[in-house]
Structures are given as C-alpha cells and as structure tokens.
Image (spheres, helix red, strand yellow):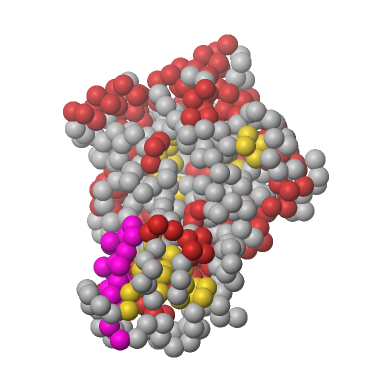
Amino acid sequence: MPRLLVPFAAAVVLLSGCTDDRPAAPSPSATAQDSAVVPGGDPAKQAADLVARLSDEELLGQLLMPYAYGNDAEKVSSGSVSANKAYAGAATPAEIVRKYHLGGVILVSSSADDPTAGTNKTTNVESPAQVAKLTGGLQAAALGLPARIPLLIGTDQEYGQVTRIRDGMVQLPSALALGAGNEPALTEAAWKAAGTELAAIGVNVDFAPDADVLGAQPGGVIGSRSFGSDPKLVALQVAAAVRGLQAAGVAATVKHFPGHGHTIVDSHNSLPVLNQSLDALESGDLPPFVAAASAGTGLVMSGHLDVKAIDPGVPASFSSKVLIDLLRTKLGYTGVVVTDALNMEPAEQWGPGEAAVRAVLAGNDLLLMPPKLTDAYKGLLDAVRSGRLSKQRLTEAATRILTLKFRLAAVPRPDASTVNGDAGKAAARASAAAAVTVLRGPCSGALVTGPVRVTAAGSETARGWLEAALTAAGATVVQQGGAEVRLVGYGKGASDLSTSAAVTVALDTPYVLRSAKGTLVATYSSSQASMSALADVLVGKVKAPGRSPVPVQGLPATACD
C-alpha cells in the first residue's frame, strides 16, 4: 500500500448544548454539575478512569446510537410506544436510554426529496423548541443513571438535500455551492454559525460534512452533498467546515470513508463498488479525510462500500483492512469511528446482533441506527460473555467515545438567542452570494431586463423566495409574459427545461445546464439565501463570482473569466 502524503491527526475538541425555543435554559437534572463527565484534566485519562468503573453492560451501551420513536423524551403517542417496544423493548425514548445505558441517540426526519430518507423509520424533529425539549429530556434520562454519563446527540444536518432540522433554523447553501464559492473562510464562518445553532438546541454531533470527492459520472449518487470533484478544493472546504462546527461546540463527522463520490450505486439500497487502484484512492478520495482529521474532526463515518483494491466483497464498514489497517494503522487516526446506518441494505445481510459484533470487531466504535436494538445489544453482550468480543476491544471503543465526551464538557453552551439569529443569516447570505455562477451569458449588467416571470420545476418554495427577492431588488415580477427565469430543482433533468427561458438556473447540480439554451446560471442550492443572491445577479446589482466545482459537458467553469 502506498504511503499517504499526510498522516491523520488525532481527533480534537468539541462541545455540547441544550436549551428551549428561543430555547430556554436546560433543566437542572440535565446540567454538567450532575454529570460524571466534567471539564478539567486530560480527557483520555479521565475516560480511562471512568471506563475502569463501568460494568460490561454500561460499556456496551456507550457503543450504541439508535433512533427512537416520539417527539418527547417521556411522553409519546400510543403508536410511538408500540414502535419503541418492538424496536427496543421500552416504551419511550427516555426509557430506551435508561434500559441500555446508551452512549448516544440520533434524531431523524425524512422528506420526499431526501435521498437518505429510506433509513429513517420515523421523525422526531419539528422545531428548535421541540428539539431542545427532547434533547434536554434525553440528557436528563442519561444523567439520572448511576454512571451519570451524558449522551452524544446527533443528526444529519448537511444542509441542502440532507437536512433534518429546517424550520426555524438558518439554512446554509449546499456543500456544492460552498465549493463553487471556494472561499474557505466563508465556509468556516457559515458552519460555525450553523454549529452554534445546533449546540443551542442540544445537538452535539453533526453527521457532516460530506468528504466525498465526486467522480466522472455526473454527480453519481452523492451530487450536491459533495463540495466538488477536485480533491484539493474538497479538502480545503471539508477542513473549513470541520473547524467551523467544532469551534461552535459540535463534533464533526466526515463521511463516507474511504469515499462514496465515485459511485453510481446508492449504499442505502445495495453495495457500491469502488474500482479505484490504491494510488487513485490515495490521490482522489482520501485527501479530504486527511485534511479533516488534521483539522480535528471528532468522528469518521465508515461507508458501506466495496473497496476492491483493499478488501474485495466486504463492505468497508465491516472491513478491518479498511478501518484498522488503513484508517487506524496506515493513516494514524485515533478518534471515534462510527458506522453508517446499520439499517441500510449492505449491513442487513447479517442479523442485527451479528452485524453489531462484526462492525465492532472491524474497528467501529459507535454503532449507528441498528435495525433492531434489542437484537444488537444481545448480540454484543453474548459476544463479550463468550470471549468473541474481547474486553480489551470493548474498553478501547468505549474509551474513545468517553474521551470525546470529556472534550465536549469543556466547551461552553451557546446562548439560545443564536437560533435563527442575525449572525447566522449573514453567514448564509455571504456563502450563498459567493456561489452564484454564470456558465453562459453576460458577466456584468442585468441578465434580464423589463418584467420578469419566474417558473419552476421542482421547487415552488424557491420560486416564491426568488419572486420576493426580485421585487425587493426593484424588478417587476409578472405571472404572464416577461422574460422567463426557469428554476430547475433537485432530481430534474432535460425534460424539465423550458425552451422559452431567457435564463435557466440549476438549483442543485449544474449538469442539467448542458442541455439548456440561453443564459445559464447555477446556484447549486434552493435556500432562501441562495435565491436572494440570485436575484441580485439577475438584476445586475452584483457580478456572479462563483465557478462550477464540477465539470459540465460543453460549458466552462464560468463564463466570467
């Protein structure tokens, strides 16, 4: 195996937070004073000392990060009670935490245009106030146990298509938009603002940013979740996002190791194959992971990927050759490794108990979303009692997780007033403005003159935002006639283009623009901030500064060089 250019650094510092809408202060039962995990001293030594006092059952619990049914920790619907009992043998999210001495919980939701929605069997995200109350109740349940160990509470807040908490929170543009702006300082500021909001509502782990480098296929399955197709650009952006999140007190999780960007198969549904050579993997896929760890990423997520050059036929998430020989030994990473969701198809070739054991033996520390918690826990406990899963390996994984928690304890909680605040909105606007790209058309002055008619394929909400922004910028917006601005949203293709459009705008990946006529613009995102930035370019208030971070057949990266 070739030597990598930069060794992985050990994972560093992070944070936590728990408040209510504008979230109120956390309840006394959920405060650090009642926790065994407090700041001060060496986190690794503190974690080792705590691990030595825990039972096997308590140690096993630290390795589990399931979901739960219900929007409140203690009070849930009868349907949620039934679902929780079938999944975990307990009625409420709080009871699940107490029953298994959980190390963490993931908050989930789904929407029709979310490519990851299939693994989310429920939703427990409604608003910042509700999330803050839920996280506070979950932490109270954990801190009420004898060990008094707080939870890692995570969610997939990538921004763009994969975003769990939308209403009442500032929405950044997609990763691909940030890649188009290619200004790491703006990216870091935007993710710091986003992380501050997450910490304020009690989320202390973000399963983001996506560190995948896009391959030659037009976006593959990752699409706008990636920062682009240039490994160096993606590495700079990923590192900036990691720094921003963790400065705000949220642990970043780079995914999907060793790289999902060169695939056309979705790992939610089947096992993608990576056919790259080791040299190609090193130069084309690994640089963002190296950069992220050097920036101090708290976690690395293992991907359900068949890496032919390393361990053919075995998902990377279950491969010790990938996770121990490559990630741990060759790259020197010492932080927490978390599986991708274990209820995805490639992980379900084994039962929940066997999959959990195999995942830990392969090198994962934290098991995300086992398909049936009762079976996963039993499988792990049986493996410990039989000696198949050694106490040393169990202790090693729990120590890494607890070390992360001790580091989290050292970071002050952000104030609740930061949620949906001016600072976050300003950071989102700045990063969205840097992204707007003209791939064909004039580079100065207005792109449309006279009355403007906005039409949309796939994003009526974005259409409304753009119409309002155009009106505010002084344009006359009409419903008939006028110069047509056609918005083409996520999942749309050539058949959704308008032959009469004066301007066609790609709101997701820009590949659709290769089939369009007239002036071509990409925002890579349909957020409100992106529509405001687009309006300013359309009326000629500003030039479009972005460059496409992926190649689009027949078009330059920008028409404005």
Outermost bottom residue: 445
The quarter of the picture where residue 28 lies is top left
User: Residue 323: image x %, image y %?
Assistant: 65, 36
Q: State the image coordinates of residue 459 (x, y, percent, origin top left).
A: 32, 60
**Which residue is located at x 51 percent, y 40 percent?**
266
Residue sticking out furthest to the front: 499
Q: Position of residue 141 (x, y in %)?
A: 32, 35
Residue 460 on the magenta span: yes
Name of the residue lying farthest toward the top: 386
Which residue is farthest left? 78
**Part of the protein shown in magenta:** 450-467
Q: Which image quarter: residue 119? A: top left
The answer to whether residue 138 is magenta is: no
Q: How many marks?
A: 0
Q: Nearer the viewer, residue 439 or 135?
A: 439
209 versus 154 height, above or below: below
The one nearer the camera, 538 or 103, is 538
Q: Is residue 451 visible?
A: yes
Taking the spot 60% from the left edge, 31% from the top edge, the residue there is: 315
Q: Which sits in the foreground, 74 or 359?
A: 359
Eyeballing the image, is 535 above or below 487? below
- Vertical comparison of 352 with 292: above or below: above
Q: Position of residue 444 (x, y in %)?
A: 48, 87
> Which quadrant, please, contains the C terminus?
bottom right
The answer to whether residue 250 is seen in the rendering is no
Residue, x 77% and y 53% (percent of image)? 5
Closest to the observer: 419 or 494?
Answer: 494
Q: Quadrant of the N terminus?
A: top right
